[in-house]
Amino acid sequence: MPSTLLELCEFREDIRKSRFITLAGPISSAAEAMAFIERHSDLAATHNCWAWKLGAQYRSSDDGEPGGTAGRPILAAIEAQDCDQVVVLVIRWYGGIQLGTGGLARAYGGGANKCLQQAPKRLLVQRSEFSCSCSFSELALLKLRLAEADGLVLDERFTANGVDLQIALGDAHLNTLQQQLADLSRGRILLERR
């Protein structure tokens, strides 16, 4: 199951006098990925190579390194670690010794791999949307049970009779939550798939 990062992560490494700093972070949009790259790139460095993956979307850049020796290995590291919604930037300061195409691919891909391995992660849960209604007195307990099931409240609307909710919930927790809500409300709260 894919996971994303909880926070910014950094890995530093020197390879044959070249200095590499790898930064990785969570993203929720392509614009956020590009903003991360722009914010953390070092213009004084020789190369700022990067890759990001967001569902089926992905991009990478070799930033002047020989084609396919930086961006693609970084993207391959993201996929090898089963990460999604992640951006990785590898900054290189050239140390005077050529690494060759294989050495560059190992340096960029290896740095990205090591950075992502040590990063704190959380699983990305696939959720389905449901709607339900409850009374005002049941709302707090419903939200508590939903949080325990790793669900989300997408929308809540107060009416004269109570509250109409739109929620998102993983299928693995559906039956348990449905039973808890039925017990809580004597069978009145029903989850309807949207």
Image (cartoon, grey):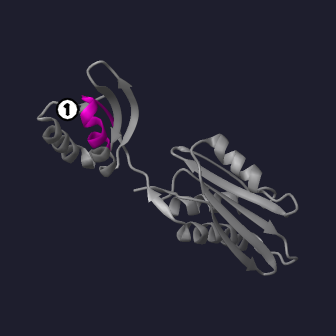
Q: Residue 119: percent from the left, percent from the top?
A: 55, 67
Q: Is residue 156 above or below residue 140?
A: above
Q: Residue furthest left?
A: 186
Crowdedness near tag 1: few (<14), some (14–19) or many (≥20) residues, C-alpha within 10 Å: many
Report the residue at 25% width, 34% height from top: 137
Quarter of the rendering containing residue 122? bottom left
Report the residue at 30% width, 49% height from top: 149
Q: Quadrant of the N terminus?
A: bottom left
Between residues 134 and 23, which one lies in front from this camera angle? 134
Q: Is residue 69 left or right of residue 43?
A: left
Q: Is residue 65 left or right of residue 122?
A: right
Q: Residue 104: percent from the left, percent from the top?
A: 72, 70
Q: Is residue 48 above or below residue 154?
A: below
The stretch drawn in magenta includes residue 134: yes
Q: Is residue 85 above or below residue 99?
A: above
Quarter of the rendering containing residue 136? top left
Q: Residue 6: percent from the left, percent from the top?
A: 53, 58
Quarter of the rendering containing residue 141? top left
User: Can you identify the residue that label 1 sits on?
Assistant: 189
Q: Is residue 67 visible?
A: no
The residue under label 1 is which amino acid type? Ile
Q: Residue 31: percent from the left, percent from the top?
A: 66, 41
Range of magenta residues = 129-143
Q: Residue furthest bottom?
A: 16
